[in-house]
């Protein structure tokens, strides 16, 4: 099949297209494929991709966009993602993250050929007591957000079409998307000499473009199953902040650390949800860059 044939054959629907990941993904794919970006309320425009508005909480709204777009592939990246908000509004988090996934899956199953369904999940499905989690490790979320994402994973596993689930680590990347990522807040805090970063919570931050590449490999090949997608380094936010300050030429004296126990948190937090990415490396050639390389790429793009 030629690239031109691909463009005609593939109709890709990306939910969460105004979100940090979905926006970047849509912009990367719209040049080569027929893409529709779906979001709820944030106004967003793309050079080529169509946009549609819908509400994951509303079954008929989900059915309408699936009927209208009739996708061959769905990347479901739309979600209520702020962990504190999910903790404060658990019912809403369930409606968006679990019922929303169910509505989309049911609508997809009603198409004559159910599309390939790629669900973006999270490292926060783990309790963080072990770290270096592989796909075989049993999930045990401690926060509402992780619980809703795991519940949605379990719905995806019963989908009547082909599916894949990618559990992403903490995502960082260049500014510009309608929704910011944690790096934007972190750099603002360091510049203003405000706030403190946890020294005792560990993730494997992943550069957004590396994650997009993995997602593309999966949906293009229609690879099914569960994959972990983190970066190559296990880091606390404090360590990431020190690295970001170094790359961006900011004073490391402005990077202050604190223990999560010192902060007034709305829920328990998993201490170490670092992901083991051996399966994606082995089977899909996944090769994420180091955090320093990712931060340098962002710095160069900004200056
Ligand atoms: N960011 C991370 O570090 C991270 C880490 C691991 C996994 N993930 C997962 O990756 C995916 C993308 O995350 P992100 O950080 O890019 O998200 P984000 O920036 O918070 O954006 C969320 C997206 O979901 C849409 N959305 C929210 N509620 C909706 C609703 N009721 N109906 C329809 N759309 C709705 C938003 O649309 P509006 O703008 O219109 O509200 C927005 O496009 C999510 O599934 C998340 O769980 C993210």
Image (cartoon, grey):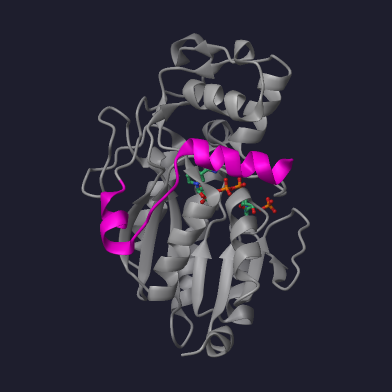
Magenta run includes residue 40: no
Asked if residue 287 is positioned above or below residue 117 in the image, the reply reads above
Between 216 and 224, the one lying in front of the other is 216
Q: Which residue is drawn at 59% across and 39% down?
A: 296
What is the x, y in percent for residue 138? 23, 43
- In-front residue for pair 231/118: 231
What's drawn in magenta, residue-wise? 277-303
From the viewer's perspective, is 50 left or right of 236? Answer: right
Look at 50% across and 80% down and name the residue there. Answer: 72
Q: What residue appears at the point 64 percent right and 51 percent down from the top-left corner?
A: 19
Could you say which is closer to the camera, residue 10 or residue 59?
10
Counting from the top left corner in percent of width and height, residue 101 is at 48, 60
Tell me how many marks there are: 0
Secondary structure mainly formed by the magenta segment: helix
Query: Does the image show residue 180?
Result: no
User: Quadrant location of residue 184?
Assistant: top right
């Amino acid at each position: 099949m030629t690239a031109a044939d691909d463009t005609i054959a593939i109709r890709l629907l990306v939910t969460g297209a105004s979100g940090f990941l979905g926006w970047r993904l849509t912009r990367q794919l719209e040049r080569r494929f027929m893409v529709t970006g779906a979001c709820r309320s944030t106004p967003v425009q793309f050079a080529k991709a169509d946009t549609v508005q819908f509400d994951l909480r509303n079954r008929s709204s989900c059915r309408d966009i699936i009927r209208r777009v009739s996708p061959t592939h769905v990347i479901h990246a739309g979600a209520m993602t702020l962990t504190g908000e999910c903790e404060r509004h658990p019912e809403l988090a369930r409606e968006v993250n679990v019922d929303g996934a169910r509505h989309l899956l049911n609508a997809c199953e009603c198409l004559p050929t159910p599309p390939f369904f790629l669900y973006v999940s999270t490292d926060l499905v783990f309790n963080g007591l072990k770290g270096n989690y592989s796909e075989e490790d049993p999930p045990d979320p401690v926060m509402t957000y992780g619980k809703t994402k795991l519940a949605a994973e379990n719905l995806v596993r019963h989908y009547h079409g082909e599916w894949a689930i990618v559990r992403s680590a903490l995502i960082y990347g260049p500014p510009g998307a309608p929704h910011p990522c944690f790096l934007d807040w972190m750099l603002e805090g360091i510049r203003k000499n405000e706030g403190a970063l946890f020294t005792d919570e560990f993730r494997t931050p992943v550069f957004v473009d590396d994650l997009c590449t993995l997602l593309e490999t999966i949906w293009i090949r229609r690879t099914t199953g569960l994959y972990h997608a983190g970066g190559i380094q296990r880091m606390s936010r404090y360590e990431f902040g020190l690295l970001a300050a170094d790359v961006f030429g900011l004073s490391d004296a402005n990077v202050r650390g604190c223990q999560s126990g010192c902060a007034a948190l709305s829920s328990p937090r998993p201490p170490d949800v670092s992901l083991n990415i051996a399966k994606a490396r082995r089977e899909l050639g996944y090769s994420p860059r180091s955090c320093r390389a990712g931060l340098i790429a962002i710095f160069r793009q900004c200056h």
